[in-house]
Image (spheres, grey):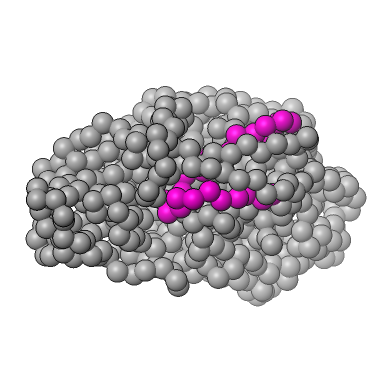
Amino acid sequence: MRRRAFLRLSALAPLGALSLRVDAATAPPKQAEPAPDGRVHRFALGKREFLLDGRPFQIRSGEMHPIRVPAEYWTQRIRMVKAMGLNTVAIYLMWNALEQEPGVFDLESGNRDFVRFIKLCQQEGMWVYLRPGPYVCAEWDFGGLPPYLLREPDIRVRDKDDPRYMRAVARYLDTIAPHIAPLMADKGGPILMVQVENEYASFGGDLAYLQRIQAMWRERGIEGPFSISDGLGTIQKQQTYLPGSALGLDGDTDFAAAQAIAGEAPVWVGEGYPGWLTHWGDQEFQRGDYAATLKKLMAEGRSFNLYVAHGGSNFGFGAGANADADYGKFDPVITSYDYGAPIDERGAATADYREFRRIIGEKLAHPLPAVPAAPPAMRFAKFELQPYASLWENLTPAKPLDQGPVANELLFGQDHGMVLYRAMSPKGGRLSVEGVRDYATVFGAGRYLGYISRVRKPGLREATYVEVPAPHAQDGEAIEILVDSFGHVGYGQAMADRKGIVGEIRLDGEVQQHWSAHGFPLDDAYLAGLRPLAHKPERPGLFFKGALALQKTADTYLDMSAWDKGYVWVNGHLLGRYWRIGPQQRLFCPASWLKAGENEVLVFDMHRTEEAAIEGFEHLHA
């Protein structure tokens, strides 16, 4: 997806000179479309068209990602996509959600069970367009690559000539390919086509890398058909079209120019954007205007994939980030992946949904199914959370550093969370910190002094230094820098986005090399071991806890507008990050994570020291 230059398409390029697959305006289908029924079907790349069992076939796809949707809601979301008039569900597989540590895979728990999701698509009469990576982008942490790769200091990801990366890719494909092969259409399953990598031209120009990934799929019994997807301009520049594959255009509709690259292979809209992503600090939630483009696609019989039909949520540490090639202009993605999609974050139809359903339905001969009801939603009254535990009283073992700070991944093998750097200093002065990734609070002698943010947005402090007062103690006082991280950059060239402090720390211009470091992964084990407060807290870096009493459960949004910056858990489930700069102030909590009775809500806030309240709402927007 073109993350830095959104093309809000309003019209298609002239198509009169092209041979079209289906002239939907004059020859609508005479019968219901074929659907996955457990029988063997042959999906093929014909001459500038897709073929299903030898007949021209229009892919009308809507994208959603199982990892972003509670598994309890998968069926409702699939039915919503179908009721909009689509016949295919496109899905990404996030490698890092399936293998969080080298060789340790989880393909079955909760919303990681992609096989079950694909089978549900088949049960609901929907085909599947599978986009399994290894790299996906998706505004997901590290573009779906496992951050454990960054524990190797000089690794080159998306590079066929780095054996460490390619061994990890092979292990991933070895694990998932046996589950995918029996789900292909030619084996009686619903998967029509498999994408090779994603948007590689936005990263590199080695066609042999794509060919190697394709060959690895074939070696594991996946014969295709295959596709690639990229921006037209980047693929023209890099010349990375994979011969014989379907060419998906991301944010572009110049089919004539694309056909010149693809020859006789099909060209289609691999990603058409009815909405767009939102970053922390944006003035408002991003939206799109895709109705006119969709109308033309349907009139011309073009195949397309709506990215996304339903976005869901970046639960846990899932949200990714964008940055320039030099790691500047860092833009982390908010927790909500509502995306302005036609199906909103909690599964309800929007005005765009109703308009898209009308546009698509007008061109189909068969009637559309009824629109499913959205799951129930609820409000709840404000309840207070009190200070519960202090990070300063729950330090992990220290690691000494004699050559300056080191990134989390290299120091602790820690992929997310926070790290604390501590040093004794005999003097005060200007403390300059370069390479903060991504947000640091600075303390001197236990007193909060200020923050340093990698994010540059209105209202945020831009300085990369803090003034440290002269110590009162004769032997000096501690300087402490607590660094929180957002998701790893997952698009473009900045694909070694290690966290913590990756530059020098200077005090009045003098490099400070001797530090100790404490890692805080904020995982279940760390949270379970928290020791409650021994006395009234005097500085920020606190966990807060409260009980939400409910008589019944339903979907809800936790309003965090009274808080500053941090994380929130409900009954042990990490909803994600919140930040006062918005635009998101409400975090989605599905009903399945709640219970009748008391629900434990835990918050870590980087700035607050006093109690605060949370209120529940039915919608993302105020």
Instruction: Determine whether, in the image, residue 570 is placed left or right of residue 162.
Output: right
Determine if residue 405 is in view. Answer: no
Residue closest to the eye, 58 or 403: 403
Foreground pick, 92 / 541: 541
In this rendering, position of residue 235 left or right of residue 412: right
Task: Please provide percent x and percent y for residue 255.
Answer: 59, 66
Number of callouts in the render?
0
State whether residue 342 is above or below residue 223. below
> Which residue occupies the foreground of this view, 209 or 57?
209
Q: Residue shown at 9%/60% (left/top)?
A: 510
Residue at 85% from the left image edge and 57% from the top image edge? 361
Rendered position, 530 above or below 134: above
Quadrant of the rendered image containing residue 202: bottom left
- Residue 522 appears in which quarter of the rendering? top left
Query: Residue 528, how many percent across, how many down?
Result: 46, 27
The quarter of the rendered structure image containing the C terminus is: bottom right
Percent across and percent down for residue 78 are: 73, 42
Does 266 sit left or right of 326 as displayed?
right
Q: Which residues are magenta?
A: 594-616
Task: Say which residue appears at 72% left-offset and 64% top-offset.
Answer: 294
Instruction: Report the magenta stretch's main SS.
Output: strand
Percent position of residue 538, x then y: 37, 48
Is residue 250 one of those drawn in magenta?
A: no
Task: Name the residue rendered at 53%, 34% in the picture.
Answer: 223
Q: Please say whether residue 535 is visible from this viewpoint.
A: yes
User: Within the image, what quadrant is residue 73 found in?
Assistant: top right
